[in-house]
Image: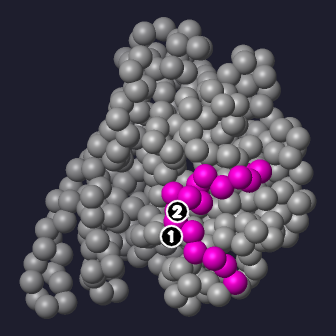
Amino acid sequence: MPTPATGPSNLWAIAQQRLDEAAERLRLDDGMRRVLRVPKRELTVSFPVTLDDGSVRVFTGYRVHHNVNRGPVTGGIRYVPDLTLDEIRALAMANTWKAALVQIPFGGAMGGVRVDPKRMSVTEREGMTRRYATEIGPIMGPDRDIPSPDVNTGSQTMAWMMDTYSMHRGHTIAGSVIGKPIAIGGSRGRREATSHGAMRAIGIVARSAGIELDGARVVIQGFGRVGTILARRLASAGAAIVAIADDETGVTHPNGLDVPAAVRWMREHDRIAGLPEGDPIAKAELLAMPCDVLVHAGLQAQLDGGNADRVQARLVAEVAGGAVTPEADVALRERGIQVIPDILSSAGGLVVGYFEWVQDMQAFFWNEAQVATELEGVMDRAVAAVCETSERERVTLRQAAEMVAVARVAEATSLRGLYP
């Protein structure tokens, strides 16, 4: 089957292709494939917002529910200027597989608004968020759809959404969103969740590949919240972070960078360029550096058919969604380089989001140690299932992860049957 060209407009085609490949390996019947290939429901909204200067602007937003057979859906809200419905569909499907892979009783959703939030004031972002929450309110709810933060959204965005949803219903409903501030029902350990889960997956897969993190040479592309926390954890485990890149450029040091200093520099300058302790390096060259582990925690499609043949890492961790294109997957597989897929390595955020929802519904909250222990157990079981399937079926970790996840969703769909 030909591989679709990679890009935001083709993410949906790639997602469906990967589903088809997993379904073929699982020998799913055509009816089940047709059910899993399409979203359960899609909502497109256009809504006006009054800006600070008194003018009115109309925004377009989306919310897609991919599959509800394992429980209510969850997924991020992103604010980006080039957002497309196909991108949202693909990410909603990925969240379905991610939830099934870590055995969380959720289906997958995704949503967002086509906007550049950096051009808006805080007041304008709040007004837009509240109106968007109102527009998707009919399909939201703790037993239907629980939104979470994503690109250019965060705990404050979720607080506005929860408050808006609650105001329309006349009482506080903390479980209507996840990723909130702790003061209004958020979970401890949420900020570190994705990095914590990724660290757990990297550690297990690295050991199985004969790589000890103590002394390993690690390159990290993407140095936002996930990348900075993951860098700290890897350095604490004894790894040398020999190169770091943000979305534009990078820095390197043969003996390992001072991670706390790099984090402070990034926080103060919003870019890694100019870090005194490092030498500048182009992002393209950074991806080709010899290392034990290459971590992608930044933008989509960073490893593609044009640069995958230059990778000299022993293990690639795809912590950012869609960082490795299908073409790159093939090239890396042919060279014997393992890839920890995004639906596994980035699942920690979804897991702790589920923990937050559980705590909200019970009005009983856990301490950080409890959250960490539970997260590690979930991730360990998920990684073990993927590695066992990979070995048994003689497939890559990505193919194994997709097989495990799709099989679980197909089983739930089959058990529930078709209505009427």
Q: What span is in magenta?
A: 277-293
User: Pointer 1: residues within 10 angstroms few (<14), some, or many (20+)?
Assistant: some
Give the mark, 1 or 2, whose residue is nearer the N terminus: 1
Task: State yes or no: discs 1 and 2 in contact (Cβ < 8 Å).
Answer: yes
Image location of residue 236, percent across then percent down: 85, 70
Which residue is labeled 2 in the image?
283
What is the CA distance from the residue labelled 1 to the residue labelled 2?
Answer: 5 Å
Disc assigned to residue 339? none
Left/right placement of residue 129 relative to residue 380 reads left
Please name the colour scheme applied to the rendered image. one colour
Could one spot residue 170 in this view of the protein?
Answer: no
Q: Is residue 54 positioned above or below 156 on the image?
A: below
Q: Quadrant of residue 385?
A: top right
Image location of residue 102, percent across then percent down: 68, 41
Image location of residue 242, percent across then percent down: 73, 66
User: Pointer 2: residues within 10 angstroms few (<14), some, or many (20+)?
Assistant: some
Left/right placement of residue 222 relative to residue 293 reads left
What residue is at 47 percent from the left and 67 percent from the top? 247
SS label for mark 2? helix
Q: Is residue 322 positioned above or below 419 on the image?
A: below
Camera-side residue of 178 and 61: 61
Left/right placement of residue 274 relative to residue 219 reads left
Left/right placement of residue 152 relative to residue 280 reads left
